[in-house]
Amino acid sequence: MRQRVRPARRRAAALVAALAAGTLLLSGCSGSVFDPAATAAPTRAGDEVNGTVTVFAAASLTTVFTRLGKEFEVAHPGTTVSFSFAGSSDLVSQLTAGAPADVFASADEKNMTKAVGAGVIDGTTKDFATNVLAIAVPPGNPAHVTRFADLASPSVTTVVCAPQVPCGAATATVEKASGVTLTPVSQESSVTDVLGKVVSGEADAGIVYATDVKGAGAKVGSVPFPEASKTLNVYPLATVAHAPNPAGAKAFAAFVTGPAGRSALKAAGFGLP
Amino acid sequence: MSLRLGVPRWVIAVAALGAAFVVLPLVAMALRVDWAHFLPLIASPSAVDALLLSLRTSLLATLGCLVLGVPMAVVLARVPFAGQRVVRAIVLLPLVLPPVVGGLALLALYGRRGLLDGALNVAFSTPAVVIAQTFVALPFLVLSLEGALRSAGERYEAVAATLGARPSTVLFRVTLPLVLPAVVSGAILSFARALGEFGATLTFAGSLQGVTRTLPLEIYLQRETDPDAAVALSLVLVAVAIAVVAVAHGAGEGLRPWRARRPA
């Protein structure tokens, strides 16, 4: 539950910061400094990276992006990275409603497509990470789950995401592709809730992401899940149109897709495209 | 009229502001409803299942609150004992506890790896929903009933006792009839709280259509894919809550003892 409370607080802080930045921008300098031509040529004023970079990122990126943000601040003195972590669909709604952000990192292509369609994205999007489903079991694997098909057994208490949310949609795809029909005791509305049920031992198995298993450390175990490769979840990233800090946006996006970002993502259990 | 004379105008103005503060967000939500598709949105099998489950579990939870809460209120109001203040504070704890924390606490006791070692075996079942709802709703009944018992006083009970009535007779024939409106309004509050329960249920019971996915959980899930359906369902929840409160409040008025209706 800690994971769910924290991003909300950060979001509030980020919004306050972003609003303050946005107000300054509107009152002071509108046209000349943030001329699109200037930002399109990073060799000019774009190199000057400072101020607050506001990043809207999918909740599953909380740990790794928080770390990357600190590294970015060290690499670019004078910058502050402010995060808002939430479900990708919530973030798109906020962006569409005009929330000031510099970078948007989505947990799936669907929500990025939505953002592009709404005209809130500037330039192209870049896939920077992938994630696959994983089977999480409580420590000691009490139900002796050894493979995906075991989860269909009535004696195994299985918890999954509801099909309405991305992890549930991916689970349904794997079920279909592998011919295994699960009978879950609960279809949770977020992957965090699935993980929580496994960590507490209420469930014998839960379908989460590989990064969730990695992030939970010794609190859960996992079971080989070759069928999961049928659904590769791709994380795209883009800079936001009318970003309050376009230079910072470009720099942070480059940082995530660069060597520092790649190694941090890999360490967190993400795949690299 | 006599009442209005005694109330300063600014109080009425602020009260109106307060009413607007509560009502306007709901009006704004109602304006968002896609009325053309309202019926199909709320009549989907998952929505109907969720509504029926919510009504069923909330009624059971209210019953649980009455069975456990009436004796609790009577003891707190009538039996002086050491540490009463502390006990009352603890009993009211679910009122201030974030529901998610309540759910975690329930897990720690009833969970498979909880203190009871999963003896009740309620994980992911409808009884788990009822337990969660009873847990969060109980303080509402205890609080309102205890207050009513204190202000009703013990005079009639003392008379009944001197006339030879046994304690149980006094309780059922004198004490409870005197505070019946408070019992009813406490039960309504508990029902309303149970109906809106979300966090503890999500943490403790899970979410499965027809088994543990109550209306608030269904609304939360629908919001992911179909915000229109979520808004429509929210409105249904509001309507059900208003209907229940109105009906039960009317019933409560009718039950008011003669003492209260007599002009002062």
Image: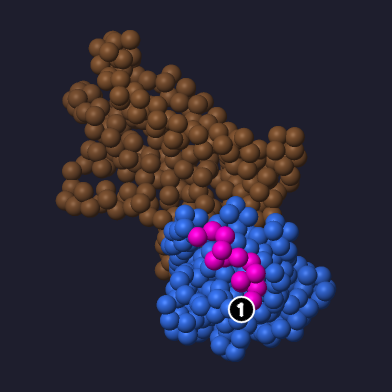
Chain colours: A blue, B brown
Rendered-image quadrant of the C terminus of chain A: bottom right
Residue, far front: A32
Element class at badge 1: loop
Residue B133 percent across, percent down from the top left: 48, 49
Residue on which disc 1 sits: A42
Quadrant location of residue B151? top left
Confirm whether residue A203 shows in the render: no
**The stretch drawn in magenta includes residue A182:** no
Residue in the image at 43% along x and 30% along y:
B19
Residue A255 vertical placement versus B193 (above, below): below
Residue B225 vertical placement versus B108 (above, below): above
Residue in the image at 33% along x and 35% along y:
B145
Q: Amino acid at mark 1?
A: Pro
The residue segment tinted magenta is A29-42
Residue B192 percent across, percent down from the top left: 48, 39
Foreground residue among A148 and B77: A148
Chain under label 1? Answer: A
Q: How many marks?
A: 1
Residue in the image at 42% along x and 68% along y:
B115
Foreground residue among A255 and B99: A255
Q: Is residue B25 left or right of residue A155?
A: left
Quadrant location of residue A87? bottom right
Residue B142 vertical placement versus A87 (above, below): above
Q: Residues within 10 Å of mark 1 (few under 14, many from 20)?
A: some
Foreground residue among A138 and A82: A82
Residue in the image at 60% along x and 35% along y:
B30
